Amino acid sequence: MLEASVLVLNRSYLPIHVTSVRRAFVLLYRGMARAVDAEYDTFDFESWRARTPEPGKAVAGLVGGVIQVPRVILLAAFDRMPRRHVRFSRANIYSRDRNTCQYCIQKLGRADLNLDHVIPRSQGGRTTWENVVCSCLDCNRIKGGRTPRQAGMRLKRRPQRPRWTPMAGFVGWGQTYPEWGPFLSIINASNGNAELAQH
């Protein structure tokens, strides 16, 4: 539960990131963020802890009681705007490929996944969106330093640069919560007809 997702807003209430419940509690406790409820009221750590958890909502145990898990937090001093371009990173490759091995199509936890260069670096392959895919550890080991064709394997989808913003990409493929809805509609409106990459 502490690894579940929490939506992070900048001071303008625009979604800029998704973090874990664990990290959200750290930010609240340190005064770097405030919890946001369904009425858009904000709470520091102590006032959030003093609230009675709503029925059916997730809670975390504390010494002497429980605290409701916040689903949305507002950063106290951060005005960054959501990015329009997707940064090349391990996490974004996993998001693009939906935590699914692109060879055997097994969906796994990130600890059981790796990144694979379709054309190996030893054969001139580059580290780009179009040449790196998510693979399970077994497929990565079997393929080794060969191309899929050389290894007798088939790549299920040709890798491409995503056409979504990082936030839209996560929302399209990750766990979301009803509490995120009002804030995500702002992003969807500002992105116009931005489409999620379908690979």
Image: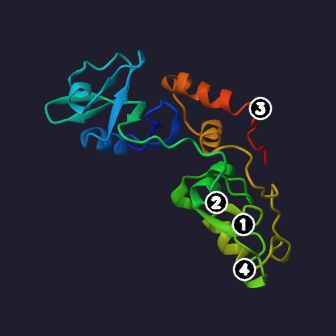
Q: CB of mark 2 within 8 Å of CB of mark 3? A: no
Q: Amino acid at mark 4?
A: Arg
Of the numbered discs 2 and 3, the one sitting upstream in the chain is 2
Tell me the CA gap for discs 4 and 1. Answer: 11 Å
Residue that protrudes farthest toward the bottom in the picture: 122
Query: What secondary structure is marked by label 3?
Result: loop
Q: Is 88 above or below relative to 47?
A: below
Q: How many marks?
A: 4
Residue 43: x and y in percent read 29, 26
Q: Amino acid at mark 2?
A: Phe
Q: CB of mark 2 within 8 Å of CB of mark 1? A: yes
Query: What secondary structure is marked by label 2?
Result: loop
Q: Amino acid at mark 3?
A: Asn
Q: Is residue 98 left or right of residue 82?
A: right
Discs 4/2, front: 2
Tell me the CA gap for discs 4 and 2. Answer: 17 Å
